[in-house]
Each structure stands twice: as C-alpha cells, then as structure tokens.
Amino acid sequence: MSAPLLPALLGRFRWDALPFVRAWENPNANELIAAGAGALVVAGALFMVVLITRLGRWRWLWTEWLTSLDHKKIGIMYIVIALVMLARALIEANLMRLQQAVAIGNPGLVAPEHFAELFSTHGSIMIFFMAMPFLTGLINYLVPLQIGARDVAYPLLNAIGLWLTAAGAGLMMAPLVIGRFSTGGWSGYPPFTEIGFNPGVGPDYWIWAITLGSIASTLAGINIAVTIYKMRCPGMTLMRMPLFAWTSLCTAILMIFAMPPLTVATALLALDRYLDFHFFTNALGGNMMHYANLFWMFGHPEVYIVILPAFGIYSEVVSTFSSKELYGYNSLVIATMAIAVLSFTVWLHHFFTMGQSPSLNAVFGIATMAIGVPTGVKIYNWIWTMFRGEVRFTTPMCYALAFMMTFVLGGLTGIILAFPPLDYIVHNTLFLVAHFHNMLISGTLYGLLAAYTFWFPKAFGFRLDERWGKISCACWVIGFYLAFMPLYVLGAAGMARRTPAVMETAYRPWLYAAEVGALVLFCGFVALLVQLWVSLRNRAATRVFAGDPWDGRALEWSIAAPPPEYNFARLPQVDQRHWFFDAKRKGAPYAPPARYEDIQMPKNSAVAPIIGIASTAAGFALVWHMWWLAILGVLAVVATVITRSFARDTHRLIPASAVERMERTWLDAVARARPIPREMETTPANAGLAEVHP
Amino acid sequence: MKRSGEGARAVRPGAALLGLPLLLGGCEALKLGVVNHAGPVAADQWHLFLQLALVLIFVAGPVFILVPLFAWHYRLSNRDDAYRPNWGFSWPLELLIWIPPAAIVIGLGVLLWNATHRLDPYRPLASNQPPLEVQVVALDWKWLFIYPKEGIATVNRLAIPVGRPVHLSLTSGTVMQSLLIPQLAGQIYAMAGMRTHLHLAASRAGVFRGQNTQFNGKGFQNQKFDVVALPPADYRRWLGQVRAVRRPLDDKTLAAITARSIAPQPALFSSVPPGLFEHLMIASTQGQAH
C-alpha cells in the first residue's frame, strides 16, 4: 500500500495518498472526517456533471460562459469561484473551532497534522481564492460600467486570469481527494516548508496553487489599471470617477507591485524543494529572513488589496442609501492613495519579534500607525455622508453600518499591535488572529456581501430577497462578535494560534463562545443560499429591467439590468461627477441616440480554458513528480499562446439593427415602468425606475 | 415606541449569550496572561497597554456615538430635519477629520518610540546583580535550557531566582520557533544559525507558563514549559538538587533530545559539555541539506 505505484507514470503517488484508503485501513474520527471531505468533493463534482448533462447544458456552458471574453461574465464566474471556496473555508473554520472547543485536555477529533492542514487551507483559500477572486470579479464587472467603457483593455488576458485562478483553486481542492495539503500555514514559512522538514506533497500543492493565483492577480492588476487609464468614456476625468473605480485603480496598482514578490518567494521556495537550491534553508548559506521579507513585501499591501475595493463599495453604498452626495470626495481619493503608498512601508511589523534593532521596529511601528489617519478620515467621510441625508436601512447599508463600528475596533487593536512592545506579548497568539479577522470580516467580507446585494439586480435583472438578506447580515455580524471577541481575550491570556489541543481548562468558556460564533457565521452563509433560492423563485415579481432600482448615481445604473453585452449603445459623454444622477434630475436620462451603430466585441475564445486546464495539469504533475505530464502541460500552454498569436479574426460585429432592437425593448420598458419612491424600493412595485426627487 | 420595544427584545438574548462566558468564570483565563504580570518587563508592557487603551477610547468614541446617532436620526422616515442631498464638503470639517487624528498619531509615535527603546528585548535590565545567563535551544518539540556558568541544563523547565535579571540567548536546532512567557516578558524568535536575546526578571515567586508560539509541526501543542521563579535561597537549593541527580548531558542523551519527540516530563542534567549552545547553533547550519 505504501510503495510508489508505477513511478515513471504516476510519480510519487501511493495508494495511501487517497483519504478513502487511509480511512479504510485506520477508521478513526480523524481519517473519517478526511475521507468524508474527499467524498463530498467527489460527490459535488459528479452531481454537477450529471446535472449539466441531464439539463443538456454543456454546449451552452461552453459557448456562453467558459469561453466568453465578456468582462461581465468573467466577473460573475470569479464570484462563483469565490462563493464555492468560501463555503469550503467556512466549513473548515467550523471544524477548527469545534476541535479547539472539544480538545481541552485531550486530543479532540482531528489529528494535529490534519488540524495544521485545516488552518493552512483556510487561510490560503480565504485570501487567495475567496477574497481575491470575489473582489477581482466585482472590479471586472463594475469598473467598465462605471467608467463608461464597453469592455476591459485586454479581454483575453482577463479570461486567462480567471482560468489561472480556477487552476489554483483546483489545486487547492485536489489534496482533499489525492494527497495532503501543506501544514505550513497560509504564509508557508521556511524552513518548516523545506524538503528536509516537510518531504511530502503538501507544501508543493501550496506552492503551485499560490503561484498560479499570484500570476493571475498580477495579470488582473495590469488589466484593471490599463482599463481605467485608457478606456474611460469622453469627459470621464480621473476626478469624475466613482469612488469604487478609484479604489479599484489603487488596488490594481498594488497588485502590480505586490504580487511579483510573492511569485518570486514561492518560486525560490520551489527551487529549494525541487532542485536543491538553498535560498531559505538552515544550511549552506540559506536564510529564511529573506523569505519573511519577500512574503510580507507582498503580504502587507495584500491587506489593502482586499480592503480598498471594499472601501469603494462602502462609498457607493453609503452615498446611495443616505440619498446623498458622498461627503469629501477629494479627501477620500487622497486618503485612498495615501493608504496605497503607505501600505508598502510597513511590512516589517510582521516580524517585530525576530530581533531587529528597536529604532527599526519603531520606524515601522509609526508607519503602521500612520495608516490609521487616512483610514480614520474615510470613516468620518462616510459618517458625514449620512449627515442631513435620508438613510434607508437596506441590507447593504446594514453591512456598511456594521462595518464602520466593527472596523474601528479592529483599527484599535491594530494600533496595539503596531506598538512593538505590545506586539511581543500578543504576536502569534489568538489576539492577532482576532485582529486580522476583525479587519478582514468587517472590512472585506461585509463589503463583498454588501456589493453582492447592491449590484445583484444590475447583474441578473432581479432583486435579492430583503428579509433573508437581513437575516444573513445579522448572522455575519453577531457571529463575528461571538467568534472573535473571545479570541482577543484568549490571546491576551497567552493562547498561541494554530494550537490543535489546549491544556488550560480556563480557556474553555471562551472557546465555547467562539465555537457558537463560528456556527452563527455558518448560518450567515446558509442564509445567503436560502436568499438566493427564494429570490430565484420570486424573480418574476422582483424584476428591475429598467436598471436603476436604488436611485443610483454612477453610470452602471443608466443602462438595462442585466446590461447588454456591449454595455452602452452609445458611449456616454460625461460633463460632471454625477452625470447620470444629474440627468435624472434635469429630465432626459434615457434619451436614445440619434443613430445606432455597429458595435465590435471580442469573439469567444478557447485559449483561456485550455491554458487553465493545462496549467492545472502541470501544477498537479509537479506536485506528484509526474514529469511527463508537467512537461506536456507547460508545452500545451506555450503552444496555445503561440497559436493564438497567429489568429487574426478575433472580433465580431453586433449589427446596428440588433443594437437598436435591444435598446428599444429596454426603452419601452423604461417608458412603461412606474417611478418608484424610496419608501417602496424593496417592494414588488420596484421595476428599476427610481422616482426623481430633488 | 413599538419599534424600540422590539429592539430591546432582540438585544436581550444576544446580551445573555455574550455574558455567558463571564458567568462561567471566564476571567480565570486572563490570569495566565500579561494582565497577571509577575515581572518588571511584563508589568511595563501591561501599563503601556493601559495607557494606549485610554487614548484609543477617545479616538474610537466619536465613531461609536456618531454612526448609530446619524444613521438613526437621519433615517428616511424622520422628516423633521433639513435634507441637503448636494452638500458634500466643508473646510472646518476637513480640518477636524485630518488634523486631530494626525496629531494623535504623532503623539502616539513619541510614546511608541520611547516604549520600543525602553522595552527592547535586547536591553539588559537595570539591576545591581549580574544577570543570570541562560542559553535556550528550541528543538522539536521541546525547549533545552543551558546554564553555562552553573554547568547544568534542563529540558522544559526554567528555574530562575526571584529579583535577579535573566538574560536568555536563543537559537534553534530546527525550524523557526518563538519563545513567549506572557506573565514575564514578550516573545522573541529562535532561529537556526542565529542568536537572539531576551531579558526578563520575575518579581515574585511562582510557576509561569512558557511556550513556543510559532507552529512547528505535530508536537507543537505540547511544546510548553514551566518557568519556576524561586526565592534566591530556594534557587541555590534547586541548583544543588540538579547537580545531585548525577545525569550528565552526554552525546547519547543529546541525540535523544534533539530527535523529533515530545518530552513527557521535564528533565534535569547535572552537567553539560562546554560550548554546547554554540555547537548546536553551528550544527544546525552545516552538513544537513535542510
């Protein structure tokens, strides 16, 4: 059972790489949980295959979605990946909390190394395959609409980014069924992840999944930045862009500069592991401090990569649902830029405890605190946006309010951690875990969920159920406090993070509370699924085809919901920041163009899916040392790129007549729709035409 | 009125749930941490924490008050107040939201600079006694403490005299680890081939929990040790007891300790080869490919 099988063909694969075999040989709780998770993945995949076959939707899936270069569809596919990965990482979080709650003075349910796999996948997934795809998806969907563009700058590159992300996500899922994942945490610190201490396949899975994800994010960053610089509609100066477009631009710049250090760090670690280099080893001149520097040179800006778009989302949400112009637009732009720049000056605070000089630690501590100033300014901008407005407590607004209160708490604990002498006490404890969840859940996750609720009607043409949205929001908020406030206490009491079993019985009540909180958070996710189900069932009653259900301000609300493939029949001519909003007040926001024109859009392409599948195969083969498959996969990628470079016929025309037909249908619907006052925006009366009210 | 009644009802179960851990005696946990400090370093860190917390209450206070206040007062159904949809800028407000936060950060920066230098783990503690030198080697999954001047060593037990400063020199025989004794001092990493330092002292007798906080594999959760702070006379007696066990740390025992394993209980060694710490520090960077 434990000898490699056909090494030339299957590399280092052995039968006991399968969790099912391990569970059969040794049926204890730990192995049964692992086999159950593997079975769930296999069953889920089979279910999807059978379902699509039964519905006869393979061709449709391929031509309408998988090969599409439409930025809107790519954005939605990114978010689908993010939601699937969120489900997995949440289940893992619950399992970890359950383990710590039961493993007080005993080994508990899962073995220590299995627990280590859980926290490693949980962190890697939440950052690289939940937060990143979710926000990249939102940016992809929204930015071209907000800046009045028909497409992104590089549609094919965009699709390749999506497929590389999917490839990375695939490599995160694979170890559930074949092999084991890394036990080195989401940061994968050597020398623990070096071959001498960790000879298994786990760290290799981590390396290749993260490498694919980081390359995808670099590509996405380049595409977003160029799109914003080059594709804005006439009159859309930078200072007229909605705040979400601004934060997307800053995020894109951060991605371009912050992702390559990560790619380099994982590549060097791969060289150590595969070719006996010694960058980060203990012996022969290696030094893991280089890894710490490279990783956090990425890792700290990453925090702002995932949080800045959420700031943009809150700006849109707070302004729209306070029925008011955003307070201090210029301040918000300056603060966003300041955060983006400062985020590159603080990475050393991740290793205050490695013995640097106090002056160096102090400089980085002060730089870290300095980020609090622009962040605080932003919070106050949103507060003053509500001032003398008309606040509507819709689901996205509830997320925004919960965010403002909760995020401030995270900021306070962040200042505590920025003080090196205090960091010494709580570094590597649950206090730190509580702090970054405080920032990432209230900052990023609430923002993403607010955006999901806010823009869902734009993307799919019908509104989400408000009641289930509120239930879900309440669960995410209450669950967060229950799950993470106890961790602050436990951290202050000296409980180390990543502990699979607990010796101190005094920790028990707090661990129980945290476990309940994790369950409530999971209920928040279930409520989201129920909301989607209920909304799908009621969609006939909640259609908002006219496209503007919340009296929106930016350009994306000026077109049909869902938008046509070409976004804008005629590119808008913008003369001020709130062009569409102002047009609604003045009278003719929906004037048809004098003449419709042919519109050129990119043709579907199989290049991206082929690259995605080939890189998944190559990554998987590298993990298992199946060299023939690795070479084949890399060659397939190169060959696809070369072949594509000869393709000339990459565009298709949408004839003016088709554009006219689609636009007429929409304009007729707008003409028939009853303008809806703000009080009634969550009722079935809302067909997407907002009542103009000065 | 009806609405606020509903709100209160919704809040009650939540509050009860939050209060539950406290009722169950949750404060016991904090006794294991810096709150219950037992030495000058941890005490100073705790006081710094209190100072900072006091300032931060004033930083966060306005947000906690204004967010619910504005959201509720300017709700759609309240028609009492002027609605100014196009108001979006005011110089006095701008100055108010930029200058005070910047001033607070500058003030905290001064505090941070001083505290970071005062509490630098490499800085010897002021005392009229010479510090007790202890060399610490992080191993999988145990801690080896060498007392070079006393010529003894222990595994997973660090005995120190109350009132006398202790100087720890740390290295790792394997992967990166981090040593934390929350009631005595903050943590510092132990890394192969490198030497880090930590100064601490105990101001009262007692047993304090020390641990590795940097995950290093299977036995991580068991890599804990007791710091036993003894009155000077008891400490001298303890040294005598260790010497009396007549169990030298020879090559065979050392090989057993450096192998990956969990130590079921603390061990005491009556003598150590000289230069063992330096030997282990160099050994971890030579020969082996990892």
Image (cartoon, rainbow, N blue to C red):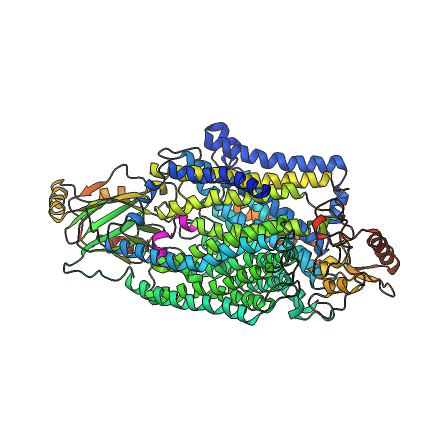
**Residue B1: x, y in percent?**
58, 43
Q: Position of residue A251 (x, y in %)?
A: 58, 62
In magenta segment, residue A429: yes
Residue A7 in the figure: left or right of residue B247: right
Report whether B202 appears left or right of A590. Answer: left
Q: Quadrant of residue A412?
A: bottom left
Quarter of the figure with residue A595: bottom right
- The residue at the point 58 percent across, 54 percent down is B73
Residue A31 image point, x, y percent: 48, 32
Position of A70 relative to A104 (above/below): below
Q: Is residue A29 visible?
A: yes
Please indicate whether residue B139 sits to the left or right of residue A639 in the image.
Answer: left
Q: Which residues are magenta?
A: A422-432
Residue at left 70%, top 52%? A678
* Residue A495, position as x, y percentages in the image: 36, 45
Magenta stretch holds residue B102: no
Q: Main secondary structure of the magenta part?
A: helix
Q: How many marks?
A: 0
Report whether residue A614 is seen.
Answer: no
Viewer-side residue, B196 vs A508: A508
Residue nearest the observer in this picture, B154 or A479: A479
State the residue in front, B218 or A598.
A598
Quadrant for the C terminus of chain A in the image: bottom right
